[in-house]
Image (spheres, rainbow, N blue to C red):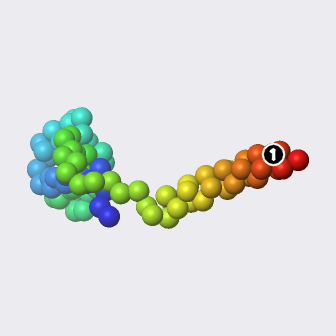
Amino acid sequence: MENLRNRVDVGLVTTVKQLPKLSRAPSFDHFRIFTPDIAAVNLKKTVLYLNRTIYAGLLELSKVLVSCLKLLSDEVVLVFQYFIR
């Protein structure tokens, strides 16, 4: 499953003027220098379009259901023991 919040914009910088311009942006995350002439600048997405549903894992849901059933079964047993006496 793809997490849309992990997407980034990458800008390739080839001139000296471009790096300070991109590093001042509010969405600036980090940069990496590959050669003296080329650097990559990672920018976070400023606008997210969440057009896909976020799925909760089936395993997590089953764990919650089992833990709720355990709590309920303990209470039900106590109630029945009370009424049987």
* Residue 78 at least partly seen: no
Q: Give SS at disc 1.
A: helix
Disc 1 crowd rating (10 Å Cα; few below 14, some 14-19, many 20+) is: few
Q: Which residue is labeled 1 in the image?
A: 83
Say which amino acid is labelled 1.
Answer: Phe
Above/below status of 48 relative to 14: above
Residue at x 12%, y 54% (from the top left corner): 14
> Is residue 60 found left or right of 35 in the rendered image?
right
> Is residue 26 found left or right of 80 in the rendered image?
left
Residue 33: x and y, percent? 26, 57
Q: Nearer the viewer, residue 76 or 70?
A: 76
* Residue 49 at least partly seen: yes
Q: Which of 70 and 84 is in front in this view?
A: 84
Residue 13: x and y, percent? 15, 53
Quadrant in which the N terminus is drawn: bottom left
Residue 12: x and y, percent? 15, 55
Residue at x 29%, y 61% (from the top left corner): 2
> Is residue 59 found left or right of 8 in the rendered image?
right
Residue 38: x and y, percent? 17, 59
In the image, farthest residue toward the right: 85
Q: How many marks?
A: 1
Residue at x 88%, y 47% (from the top left corner): 85
Q: Which of 44 and 20 is in front in this view?
A: 44
Residue at x 66%, y 50% (from the top left corner): 72
